[in-house]
Image (tube, grey):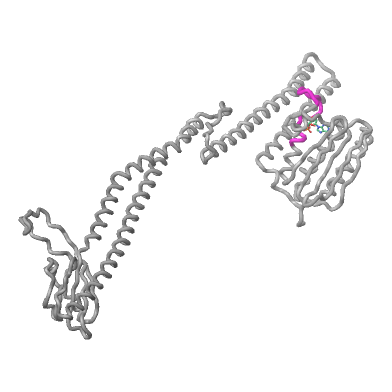
Amino acid sequence: MLSIRQRLTLWYTLVLMVMFVTFAGVIYVGGAWQLRQAADRELLDTARQLTETLLRGEDPVAVDVAYRFLTLDGQVVRSSGLPARHVPIAAAAVEAARNGKTWSEIVAMPARPLGPQPGGGVLRRPIPIQLRLLTLPLGNPTQYILQVGTITTDLQRLRNLLFTALLLGLVLGLPAAAAGGWWLAGRALRPVKAITATARRIEARNLAERLPQPPQDDELGQLAATLNGLLDRLQAAFQRERRFTADISHDLRTPLALIKSNIGVALNRPRTAAELQTTLTQVEGQIDRMTGLVEATLFLARSDTEQLAQEFAALNLSELLTDLYETTAPYASEELGQTLCNEIAAGLWVMGDRDQLTRLFLNLVDNAMRYTPAGGTIRLAGRMQGQHAVVEVEDNGAGIAPADLPRVFDRFYRADEARTGGHHAHYGLGLSIAQAIAQAHGGEITVRSIPGRGSCFTVSLPICLTR
Ligand code: ADP
């Protein structure tokens, strides 16, 4: 398998070679055509002058043009003295002229014999000379045939020049360009090597390590930045996961220790039935606490794997909130001395799960009641706002310190309580669960709070248009 560097260089060189050859080809074909056209035009002019001279019966003075005057059956009547007169007469040309047509062709001049030449020199190599030959009919109907020819040295020179240039380009230019391409590709791909080497080293133990960031903000720079962003998120997720496990272990250890100590005390000496019952009630309380924790953890685990949204149906949120209000309001006023206000608009419909949404709002109302002293007021409001149903749970209780505010939705985060916890089932998971439910419903939950003045939790859920 070729490396990217090799493939890049190969492609680059191949494309360059094709371009070289095509360029030379186009120049040659175009140039040759132009030269041939010019030669034909010149030959035609000369032929016209020659005809006039010959018809006048004079001997024409031809300089660098050879001519031949033929009868219709191809007999030479008169010709110039140039070696061109040895060129054989093509039957097709005579036939065309006989039919009144002009015929043009390129013919090879017969090579001069090697050895001593008439001028005195010695010819070692036959020089291939080409002749552009024009055959014209004379008279109407045709009585004679005139052939004029000129040596096409320009064409040959152009071909030789292009061939030399192409050869030089291919032999010298192409390897140089390939070497340059190889160097450039290597330079451009160097950061990839560094990124690969570092990425190979990174594992769960050293997730803090980051890929080297290339100085340029090109594709590789963006790739490194994106992968580093991914590592940031992975590291944060790993840390969250570790903290989560540590928190669960911690929160399970406390009730387990209490259960053990309760049982230890009970077994210490013989107990009466009443004493044993008290111990068992305490143990049951601890087991309830652990069950609540395990259940909440399982719920969050399900929300992480996006299993919460599986059984959603259209439901009347106004009704759900009113039910919640009616069950909690008497408890708030009678047990806690608080006032729960109902500001729920009718006809709020959302797609969702009744149990999950009840849990979400119950968590918020429960928190509001817990962090609001007797005599306080809790407002449960629901209204339409654009395409969303907006529910607010507002209290005028203790409020949340600005430092705690961004963290209240974190798992196991409790702003006000020592980690040892009390006997009640509050592990700092209530708001995490509320947030997971809101998100599973395509909504969000936000909070604003002023310490000492109260807090307001706002849940926004997309309304359901079809029922
Ligand atoms: P918990 O299960 O301990 O109630 P939550 O996730 O529900 O945990 O809440 C996290 C923390 O946010 C609480 O420990 C409390 O400090 C703070 N908090 C939540 N709701 C309120 C509120 N209405 N007023 C003041 N503080 C609140």
Residues shaded magenta: 416-432
Q: Residue at x 32, y 58 (%)?
A: 27
Residue 218 visible to the viewer: yes
Residue 280 visible to the viewer: no
Q: Position of residue 180 (x, y in %)?
A: 38, 40
Q: Position of residue 229 (x, y in %)?
A: 59, 36
Q: Residue at x 94, y 35 (%)?
A: 334
Q: Based on the displayed image, in which of its 4 quarters is residue 325 positioned?
A: top right
Q: Is residue 164 above or below residue 103?
A: above
Observer-nearest residue: 343 or 298?
343
In the figure, is residue 311 to the left or right of 58?
Answer: right
Which quadrant is home to the N terminus? top left
In the figure, is residue 124 to the left or right of 40?
Answer: left
Q: Is residue 99 above or below residue 159?
A: below
Q: Position of residue 238 (x, y in %)?
A: 62, 31
Find the residue positioned furthest to the bottom. 141
Find the residue positioned furthest to the top. 269
